[in-house]
Amino acid sequence: MAAATACSLQGAIFPSLSHSHSHKQHLPLHSIRKTTTIGNNAPTRQTKCSVSLGDFIGGDLVKFDLGKWSSDVEEHKALAIYSPHEGGYEGRYLNNLRYQGYHFLDLSARGLGDPETTLTKFHPVCPAHVGKQPIARWYFPPEVDYRLSLLPPNAKGLVVWIIEAKVLSKAELQFLTILPTLRPRVRVIAECGNWRKFMWTPLKEIAGLPATGEQVSNQ
């Protein structure tokens, strides 16, 4: 008796739970409308959802700006990128460079230290001593020069892909901007933040360096 009463109350209070809503699953996307009413005499507003070309061809897979992406990488050589928070979109652009023959050096800006020392000079590293072993210091070769020496003959170059680059200072970003000038076969991609869609801009604009052809004012 109690179970029957509970079922009847559930159907009265929550009618959407007691009836099938399969008819909503087969509606086309362009026919779904959302109705919002404010107050008793307020006008009713309707929002109509429409489909786009990406819904038919796989907008998450097909990127029409890959050509612009490739040309900007070759022109500016150092880019700051902004990807959606959910992640995954940057992999399409990474693979585009991989197909061109680039190899990758993936680094995290957190714990990177001084980029100039880590990437282009012999630098010390102190391993964890766990409180018992003596504090040691090991020296590692320059990361970029070491990876360049390992590239196969048919490789196009090396892409230094830095995640969480938003924690770097402006001086560190400026060095990453001029790194392709010091090492002509190197390209730099720095993840400097997030946005609603995948976007990029020359890293020198983020680092505050003048554009190509501009002169720095002495004032």
Image: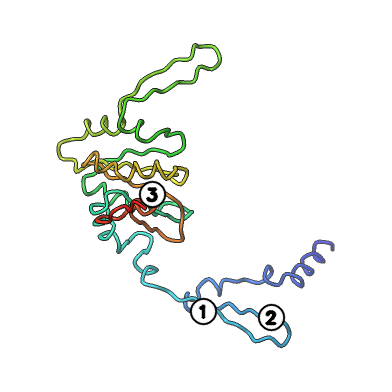
**Residue 196 x, y percent position in the rendering:** 46, 61
Q: Secondary structure at mark 3?
A: helix
Residue 18 lies, with reference to residue 160, above or below; the image says: below
**Residue 191 x, y percent position in the rendering:** 41, 48
Using the rendered view, name the quadrant where residue 152 is placed: top left
Question: Dot 1 corresponds to which residue?
Answer: 48
Q: Which dot, 1 or 3, sits closer to the camera?
A: 3
State the residue in front, 170 or 19.
170
Using the rendered view, name the quadrant where residue 201 is placed: bottom left
Question: Dot 2 corresponds to which residue?
Answer: 38
Q: Is residue 169 left or right of residue 177?
A: right
**Dot 1, crowdedness within 10 Å: few (<14), some or many (≥20)?**
few
Numbered circle sitting on residue 207: 3
Q: Are marks 2 and 1 in contact (CB under 8 Å)?
A: no
Look at label 1 and name its amino acid.
Lys
**Residue at point 30%, 25% (across, down):** 141
**Residue at point 36%, 71% (across, down):** 53
Look at label 2 and name its amino acid.
Ile
Q: Secondary structure at mark 1?
A: strand
Q: CA distance from mark 2 to mark 1?
A: 18 Å
Look at label 3 and name its amino acid.
Ala
Residue 42 lies, with reference to residue 10, above or below; the image says: below
Q: CA distance from mark 3 to mark 2?
A: 48 Å
Q: Which dot, 3 or 2, sits closer to the camera?
A: 3
Using the rendered view, name the quadrant where residue 109 is placed: top left
Q: Is residue 115 left or right of residue 187?
A: right
- Badge 1 or badge 3: first in the primary sequence: 1
State the residue in front, 82 or 179.
179
- Badge 3 or badge 2: first in the primary sequence: 2
